[in-house]
Every structure is written in C-alpha cells, then in structure tokens.
Image (tube, rainbow, N blue to C red):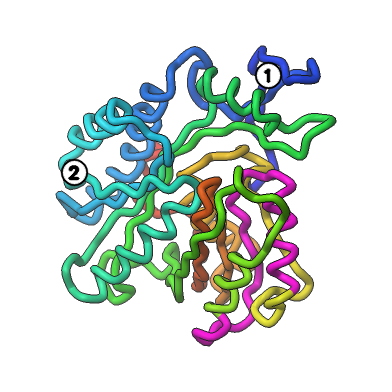
C-alpha cells in the first residue's frame, strides 16, 4: 500500500457485461469463505503473537470486527484459530457490523481501558469478499468495478491493533499512535438508500469538531471504493471543512487492496501510521480514518502521534530472521 502497488488478479469470472472480474485475493480462489476467514485469522494472529510475546502478555481480551452476515459455522472456524494462541483470550467479543465494525469495537475498548477493567485489549477485523459465491453475489448486484459500474474490487484481510493507555510500558512512542476520539453513527442501509446522503458522516465529523478536534493532516478512507461512498464523503466534507486538511488529502485503502470488509478499519489505522511515519518521520501528525458499512453503520477515529517507524521492532526482527 505504501508503494501504491496492488495485488489484484483475474478471478476467471465475468461481470454482467462480459468483462473480467478482478479480486485482491490472498488465498486460493476455490476456498469457501469460512476457511478463508480461519486462515486469515491465523496469519494475522501469528504477526500479533510476535508483538504480544515480546511484551510478555497473555490471555489479552479480543474485540473482533466481523462480516455482518457471518454464519455460526464460520464464527466457530475463527474461534478454533483463536484458541491456538495462549497470548489471546480464547473467546472474542464479536462486532459483526461490516466495514465500520472495528470503530465500534475501539470505542468500547477505550471505555474499558479508561475504567481500568483491562490494561490491554486487542481490536481486530477479519473479512473476505473473495470466495466465489460472494463474488457471484456482487456480480449479480452489479457492484463489481467495471467499465459500466463504479463498483468495488473484492478483497480480504485480517488486521489487529493492541490498545493500551499511552503511559503503559508496552506503548512505544516511535511506533504508537494516540486515539484522540472515535465516533459512530447509524444511517440507512446501503440497499435502502434512494440517493447519496452525507448526513451520517457529517454528523460524525461534527462530533469531532464539537469535541474540540482541529484540522488533521490527512484522511484515510477505509471503505469499499465504490462511487457512492466517495460522494457521501464529498457531501459530508463540505459541511465540516474546519477539521479537514488543506489541501484535502484522502488516501483510499481500496485502491491497493480492494474492499476488505470488516478488516478495513484496523487496516486504515495501520496505513495511517505508515503514512505518518514515512512522510515526516518523528514529526507530530494527525489523521482521520473513517469507514461505512452496507448496513448503515458508520465510524471514524482521529489518531495523532510522531512515529518514526511503521513496524514494531519485534515484528521487524522476526521478519528479518
């Protein structure tokens, strides 16, 4: 993502107009969604495990953003992956709200940490739109990107963040960000919307302004990449320019990885850290990350910090070895 590259490849499927359908798949194209979710969870947690082991943490509570239509069987497959890692509490709290789910989870995690219920909480997101039947459903709904559609490119990902008070020994200022504030809103579901409306996003941006936020340095859009959501932001941005960067700088995660569903929120946070660490290393910066789910859940967070590195030392060393 930092290099502006993408991992899109031809799925072998055709759109309603006969054009090739691409996807940002990480796993074999014939795997069903349940197996994809379990494998994605395992890959993401292996990275996270390196960090938690280095901090000597165990049975850390987990709040997990998931697809809004996840089945019990698929949830059990993810559960089995979690149970293999003693660093995590084996039972995660579920947030099955789609793309914006992790913002809801982060808000709950922040409250628990501030109250002293837990010192550390892992917030994660796992999703895949790359199973064949999922892609076929997007084709049937004419939501695939093509010459006749402002659609999406299906993607898949798992992403995890470790939350703690900033004065915790586990917090490393060179790679950490402070979450200044996080807000959510419930709007009309995507498939019930007759026209583009930025009301929900505008309400979230207004909440930041009323809370006391000032202009951020950049915006990370962690949605599907569809034209509808781009126009939704344009309407909302014009109503709350006081907190927006000048000139307006918006980075879209879907440009590189497609629509990663419930993983998009944490992926957006990670991308924000990368951009802040590489654009002006060690210089204080702030970013707004937002997302919108098909079911109408919307969420956003403003993060701040002066990271000088985009990857934790323990993870970097494990990759080098």
The one nearer the camera, 289 or 97, is: 97
Residue at 60 percent of width and 59 percent of height: 275
The one nearer the camera, 196 or 209, is: 196
Residue 170 position in % (x across, y down): 27, 64
Is 277 placed above or below 239 here? above
* C-alpha span from label 2 to label 1: 37 Å
Residue 227 position in % (x across, y down): 74, 47
Is residue 193 covered in magenta?
A: no
Is residue 237 covered in magenta?
A: yes
* Picture quarter with the C terminus: top left
Could you say which disc has been placed on residue 223 in the image?
Answer: none
Is 314 placed above or below 136 here? below
Residue at 79 percent of width and 15 percent of height: 18
Mark 2–mark 1 contact, CB under 8 Å?
no
The one nearer the camera, 184 or 172, is: 184
Could you say which disc has been placed on residue 10 in the image?
Answer: 1
Residue named by callout 2: 91
Q: Nearer the viewer, mark 2 or mark 1?
A: 2
Residue 164 position in % (x across, y down): 29, 67
Q: Is residue 10 visible?
A: yes
Q: Is residue 315 visible?
A: no
Q: Is residue 64 left or right of residue 119?
A: right
The residue at the far right in this view is 147
Q: Say what secondary structure mark 2 lies in.
A: loop
Part of the protein shown in magenta: 209-238
Q: Say what secondary structure mark 1 lies in.
A: strand
Q: Earlier in the sequence, mark 2 or mark 1?
A: 1
The image quadrant of residue 234 is bottom right
């Amino acid at each position: 993502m930092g290099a502006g590259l993408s991992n899109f490849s031809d799925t072998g499927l055709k759109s309603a107009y006969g054009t090739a359908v691409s996807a940002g798949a990480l796993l074999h194209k014939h795997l069903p969604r349940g197996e994809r979710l379990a494998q994605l969870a395992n890959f993401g947690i292996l990275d996270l495990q390196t960090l938690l082991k280095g901090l000597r943490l165990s049975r850390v509570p987990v709040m997990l953003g998931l697809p809004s239509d996840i089945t019990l069987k698929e949830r059990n497959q993810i559960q089995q992956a979690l149970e293999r890692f003693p660093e995590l509490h084996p039972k995660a709290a579920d947030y099955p709200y789609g793309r914006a789910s992790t913002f809801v989870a982060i808000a709950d995690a922040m409250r628990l940490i501030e109250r002293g219920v837990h010192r550390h909480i892992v917030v994660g997101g796992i999703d895949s739109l790359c199973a064949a039947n999922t892609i076929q459903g997007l084709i049937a709904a004419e939501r695939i990107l093509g010459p006749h559609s402002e659609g999406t490119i299906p993607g898949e990902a798992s992403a995890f963040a470790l939350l703690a008070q900033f004065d915790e020994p586990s917090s490393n200022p060179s790679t950490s960000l402070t979450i200044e504030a996080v807000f959510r809103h419930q709007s009309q579901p995507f498939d019930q919307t007759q026209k583009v409306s930025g009301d929900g996003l505008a309400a979230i941006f207004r909440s930041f302004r009323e809370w006391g936020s000032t202009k951020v340095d950049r915006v990370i859009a962690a949605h599907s990449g569809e034209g509808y959501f781009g126009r939704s932001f344009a309407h909302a941005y014009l109503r709350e320019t006081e907190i927006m960067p000048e000139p307006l700088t918006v980075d879209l995660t879907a440009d590189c990885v497609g629509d990663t569903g419930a993983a998009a929120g944490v992926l957006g946070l990670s991308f924000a850290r990368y951009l802040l660490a590489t654009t002006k290393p060690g210089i204080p910066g702030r970013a707004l990350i937002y997302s919108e789910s098909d079911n109408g859940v919307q969420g956003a967070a403003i993060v701040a910090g002066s990271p000088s590195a985009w990857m934790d030392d323990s993870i970097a060393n494990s990759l080098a070895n």
